[in-house]
Image (tube, coloured by chain):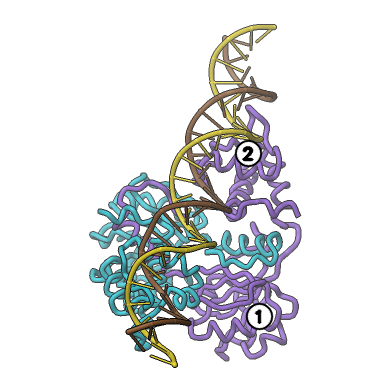
Chain colours: A cyan, B purple, C yellow, D brown
Amino acid sequence: MDQNKIPQATAKRLPLYYRFLNNLNHQGKTRVSSKELSEAVKVDSATIRRDFSYFGALGKKGYGYNVEYLLGFFRKTLDQDEVTDVALIGVGNLGTAFLHYNFMKNNNIKIQMAFDADENKVGSSIGGVPIYHINDMEKKLNGIKVAILTIPASEADGITDRLVEHGIKGILNFTPARISVPEHIRVHHIDLAVELQALVYFLKHYPLVPEVIE
Amino acid sequence: MDQNKIPQATAKRLPLYYRFLNNLNHQGKTRVSSKELSEAVKVDSATIRRDFSYFGALGKKGYGYNVEYLLGFFRKTLDQDEVTDVALIGVGNLGTAFLHYNFMKNNNIKIQMAFDADENKVGSSIGGVPIYHINDMEKKLNGIKVAILTIPASEADGITDRLVEHGIKGILNFTPARISVPEHIRVHHIDLAVELQALVYFLKHYPLVPEVIE
DNA sequence: AAGAAGTCGTGATTTCCTTCACAATTTATC
DNA sequence: GATAAATTGTGAAGGAAATCACGACTTCTT
């Protein structure tokens, strides 16, 4: 797999590029330069060219990039041709926000099911996603490899263990808990309080620094 | 301001350390080593020691760190003695999740007000935070320097311009739009679809890589 | 009181990522 | 068709962050 050579920082920008290329395509634009793209996604144009270059020479000197070609290329690269199924654990406000989000449009990701402990929610569906009882998780999960964790921190460890036991491969963790998993399982943490506090910290201690931090 | 020397990567971990130290303190622990902390927050112990060392010699060789002392130190460093007021724009599911989150406990951040265009929400309050009409934003904002953007992407540019005009300093943007601001304003983007897709990408292309990515 | 174990703080190294800067090439203009 | 303008792809340089590795010191054990 030669894509092992792609820097992680680049990989994290790919979905962003993909979405903006999609927008351009819908607008009927057929060509785009790294400079234009840079203004749209707020990433330095040299970085964009470098990112693209990991996949080969995708552009043409003096011309830029062909939108349709680039899109097609990324669709393959990002495995957009194959739907990825995801489960959501915890149908609170944050979980509900996810259920309303249409990940199919740009991402080819589908939340297939959700779980909650609240009997009032179990049996209903939100955004077309059925909600099952958390006790039935193992019965229903069946082959799903990715989970979004939007549960209270106190539940994180228990649920994580069950997911790991069941053979989950990746977890997007919105819990403040730093969960423990075997090393073959990938966890991305998104900690809303940390993000907010980090922003506040930067404002106070790094005034007037122009860069946008991811 | 000598804290200009603190690496941004370190600054982003400070809130995390702070919260775990708080937990330890509540549990009655008086002492902690970088190794223990490392296991709890999933950050290499050398990195933790390096992070702390930017603030001086906070620990004792052969002993570790005194929890209470460290906490007190970070409280000052993170400006935890002074409440930071924040406004939330957009009371959808994601916004509501924020309103229920108690940022006072660990972060000394307070969402003072929220705005929405939905007349049904205006006038009510969630989690003790009053909801005003988005049209009244300028009238109410009054001195607030930080905003959380949880609105539809289509509204992002317009609202951002108004916030900038009003003198906002920092924006936590949950919108997929990459908003444009003057360079003295700090924007942190958190793009849920990008995060999810990046996780999926890593799972497919970087199998069995143990590190936890932030 | 001596030796063993534990732990920090940090110089040095390594890894990863970004940015510069420019030759090569294509496209646009007149 | 010749000249000017635009733009890529990339070697090289620069920068930021993570990690190694160990001397120095503290605490624990007997």
Q: Which residue, given by chain and number where applicable, does mark 2 sit on?
A: B29
Q: Nearer the viewer, residue B117 or A62?
A: A62
**Pick the front one: B91 or B57:** B57
Residue at horizontal 49%, vertical 69%? A43
- Camera-side residue of D22 and A144: D22
Residue marked by disc 1? B164
- Tell me residue B173's x, y (percent): 55, 73
Tell me what residue is drawn at x 37 percent, y 49 percent. Answer: A161
Residue type pointed to by label 2: Lys
Which circle marks residue A162 in the picture? none
Q: Does the rendering let one see residue A160?
A: yes
Disc 1 crowd, CA 10 A, few/some/many (<14, 14-19, 20+): some
Q: Chain of mark 2?
A: B
Question: Residue B152: x percent and y percent?
Answer: 49, 82
Q: Residue type at mark 1: give it.
A: Val
Residue A80 as seen in the image, left or right of residue B110: left
Q: Secondary structure at mark 2?
A: loop
Which chain's residue wears label 1? B
In the image, B25 versus B19, the foreground residue is B19
